[in-house]
Image (cartoon, grey):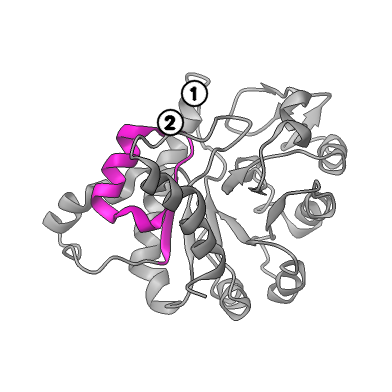
Amino acid sequence: MDVHQHVWTPAFVAALRARTRPPYLDGWTLILDGEPPYEVDPADHDPAKRETPAILSLSSPLGIETLPPEEAWPLIDAYHADVPYGFEQWASTCVSEPDPGRLAADLGGKAGLQLPATTLPDDALLDVLTAQDKPLFVHPGPASGHAPTPWWPALVPYVQQMHASWHYFHAVVRPRHPRLRVCFALLAGLAPLHSERLITRGGPSRGRLDRDFFVETSSYGPKAIDAIVRELGVDVVVNGSDAPYASAPETGLGAAADHAIRETNPLRLMRGDR
């Protein structure tokens, strides 16, 4: 199981091309605020070239979820409407004006909900997830400010966002939603590795790990995965690739760890301890 892939279907591409301000597509050139124009390769979004099973994710850096409802919903509906055969999908929702009732309906047949790390999660939306016993996927949101190099958004704003989200969920969200399962993209920006600094600055000491806070492996490799496993254990690490922008990494940890990360742990993320 790969819990993090992106495929832009014809319906979603058409919805992006129908816009005239960011985010939008001009032909196959993606125009966003805060990032340089990006030339999309249509072949990258051919589902026939992907390995399954996999869960598809809306590209939250596009900023769709935070648009006004009248702009967000046509794009989200187009994304929901066109799921390639053999894939599952993380549902998305408008966060500028949360609609728990609409989310409850949209979650039918979906793996769970994805939210951008740049927004504070709405309690009513998380209550819907808990009621349906489905997980949350936290994905980097839009980059802000000037990008001095093409790789800057992925290495600086995205990592900072995931870092902040990891700590916010532990400090604020978990006490309010004790049964929520959450998966943080890109190993939560390696935030778990800062536990020693957290303790010296007055944070909680190391104790029982939260087995329902997962991290996925996209864009990292054996060194980072090994360090996270040493800090959190293997049971909360799940396989993610961020395809087509990266490939699922080799863990370097052996067959037993690979089985846990690629099979056992993703199933527990999806289904809990059932």
| Highlighted range, magenta | 212-237
What is the x, y in percent for residue 71?
A: 79, 51
Residue at horizontal 46 percent and vertical 57 percent from the top: 265
Q: Is residue 238 visible?
A: no
Residue at horizontal 77 percent and vertical 72 percent from the top: 105
What is the x, y in percent for residue 243?
A: 61, 34
Residue marked by disc 1: 151
When the figure is inspected, residue 87 is found, relative to residue 103, above or below; the finding is above
Seen in the image, is 250 located left or right of residue 205?
right
Hey, what amino acid is under mark 2? Leu
Crowding near the residue tagged with mark 1, few <14, some 14–19, many ≥20 C-alpha atoms within 10 Å: few
When the figure is inspected, residue 211 is found, relative to residue 145, above or below; the finding is below
**Residue lying at the far front of the rendered structure:** 255
What is the x, y in percent for residue 132?
A: 63, 77
Residue marked by disc 2: 155
**Which of the 4 quarters of the picture holds residue 200?**
bottom left
Q: Nearer the viewer, residue 63 or 240?
A: 240
Hey, what amino acid is under mark 1? Trp
Which secondary structure lies at badge 2?
helix
When the figure is inspected, residue 54 is found, relative to residue 37, above or below; the finding is below
What is the x, y in percent for residue 220?
A: 41, 34
Residue at horizontal 72 percent and vertical 39 percent from the top: 7
Residue at horizontal 55 percent and vertical 69 percent from the top: 271
Tell me if residue 214 is in the magenta stretch.
yes
Q: CA distance from mark 1 to mark 2?
A: 6 Å
Q: Nearer the viewer, residue 11 or 244?
A: 244
Labels 1 and 2 touching (C-beta < 8 A): yes
